[in-house]
Image (cartoon, rainbow, N blue to C red):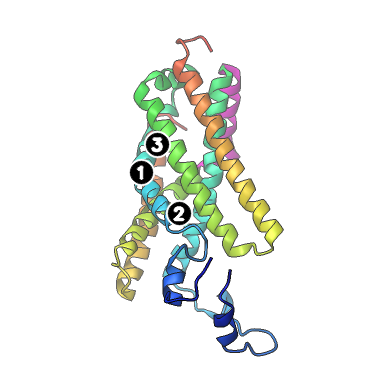
Amino acid sequence: MMQPGFRTPLRRARGLGAAKHGVNHFIGQRASAVALLFLLLWGVWSALRLAPTGYVGAVGWLHSPWNASLLVLLLAAGFYHARIGVQVVVEDYVHTPLAKTGALLLNLFICCGGFVLAALSVLKVAFSAAGAI
Amino acid sequence: MSDAKADAAAPRRPVGPMPLSPHLQIWRWHITMLTSILHRATGIGLYAGALILVGWAVSLASGEGAYGAYMGLLGSWLGRVVMFGLTVCVFFHMANGVRHLVWDAGKGFEPKTANFASVVVIAFAVVATLVVWIIAAVTGGL
């Protein structure tokens, strides 16, 4: 409950801000951006290495714990960053409460679902014995 | 919840539509505006790219047939166009993202610096994309 007391409008505005969740997203977006800078450079390099190899090459590549770990990290940082980024876009352009809530939920579900689906697929291949998928 | 007294003290809104700030068509096109719009556009492109990566992982986990079919899709004419666009998105968003981090440090806002950085970011995206695709062609990745 807001006391009329001595808090200035500025102090109140500084509380959680217009988005009602403080600076979490601001910091998270930048932290994941720094991680993605390195992970994506690795990702492009890896894509170049994997492009000429076929199925067996890709499976063997994922058997390296380094590759599997970095790929899961790329997916985690990527979908986290994507979720916040698209949320900002939705908040900018969609203003009717129902459509906005629906779009934000859809964004959340796509990013969470995409991450889990891809990460479990990566782990399945990473943990499989060579040639037994 | 809201401060009723403060609301009452606020100046009365004039009746009728609120004045709007000038929108896109009013402004002369400018390179900083282009990079700003491209950052958002490439971000949306990378959203789709993340889903393409999900498809790759799922197809790999589904076995050799599924993986072959998926790679065939990516290697098709349309697939290559999409992957080329995705490469542009990666490098543009990456370079312009670094620019955003510099802005967060409070630097790079002078018009000359901002214009120059915009050119650098676009040039980097084009050159890096071409380099990656040339490497892919040379190493047999296409």
N-terminal label among 2 and 1: 2
Helix, strand, or loop for circle 1? helix
> Can the viewer see residue A92?
yes
Q: Which residue is mark 2?
A: A25
**Of callouts 3 and 2, which one flags the residue occurring earlier in the amino acid sequence?**
2
Q: Residues within 10 Å of mark 3 (few under 14, many from 20)?
A: some
The type of residue carrying mark 2 is: His
Q: Is residue A79 magenta?
A: no
CA–CA distance in space, label 3 to label 1: 12 Å
Where does label 1 land, which residue?
A35
Viewed as shown, does residue B60 lie left or right of B107? right
Measuring from the top left, give residue B14's x and y in whole percent. 65, 90
Residue B126 on image: x %, y %: 40, 53
Q: Is residue A66 above or below residue A87?
A: above
Report the magenta residues as a range: B64-83
Label 3 sits on residue: A43
